[in-house]
Amino acid sequence: MLVSVFWILLVPAAVGIVYQDFRYRNIKVWLIALFQVLVWGAYLLRFPVTSFFINLLFCTLYAVLCYVILSLYFYFRTGKVVKLLDRKLGWGDVWVVFCIGPCLPPDVFVYFFTLVFVGALLLHFIFSGSRKTVPLAGYMITGYVAYEAYLLTVCV
């Protein structure tokens, strides 16, 4: 019952984030914070705290690994150190990774983010190739809500 309340509140918050990310490429902090509280609350009502922290640790290690790989890629490509945050990747995108990441088991986390990153790039280049920035947070939240809706309908 309480999980349903979280989902009733979570979907409008997700829609708000997706809209702001696609329309303005700027997401209100309070909206991401609300989304985080709702996602984490819904997860902790269903699963033990230990799995949350194990997933959070894996999420952090994976994010650091991706950051190092991206930094090395841009360094070898340009010959200089490129500031990734604020130039290539927004803080909202990072925050959304840490909103969603602890709520996914490690194997699902890797598959999910790989699919979302590749899908976001493909959709971005197909539908809005002229814009330089990818609304990654919007794509991640859309993918996460779709994934959770699939779990709620298939695994119940």
Image (spheres, rainbow, N blue to C red):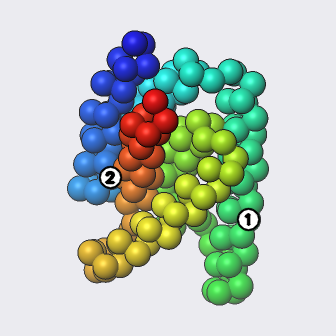
Q: Which residue is mark 1?
A: 68
Q: Residues within 10 Å of mark 2 (few under 14, many from 20)?
A: many
Farthest residue to the top: give it: 1
In the structure shown, which secondary structural element does the residue marked by tag 1 occupy?
helix
Residue at left offset 43%, top offset 58%: 136
Please tell me which of labels 2 and 1 falls first in the chain: 2
Q: Nearer the viewer, residue 13 or 1?
A: 1
Q: Residue at x 49, y 36 (%)?
A: 155
As drawn, is 87 to the left or to the right of 5?
right
* Residue at figure coordinates x 49%, y 24% from the top left: 42
Q: Residues within 10 Å of mark 1 (few under 14, many from 20)?
A: few
Give amino acid for label 2: Asp
Image spot of residue 149 (x, y percent): 39, 39
Question: Where is residue 112 drawn, in percent x and y?
Answer: 55, 55
Q: According to the image, label 2 marks what residue?
A: 21
**Quadrant for the N terminus in the image:** top left
Residue that appears at 66% across and 70% down: 70
Residue 33, visible in the rendered structure? no
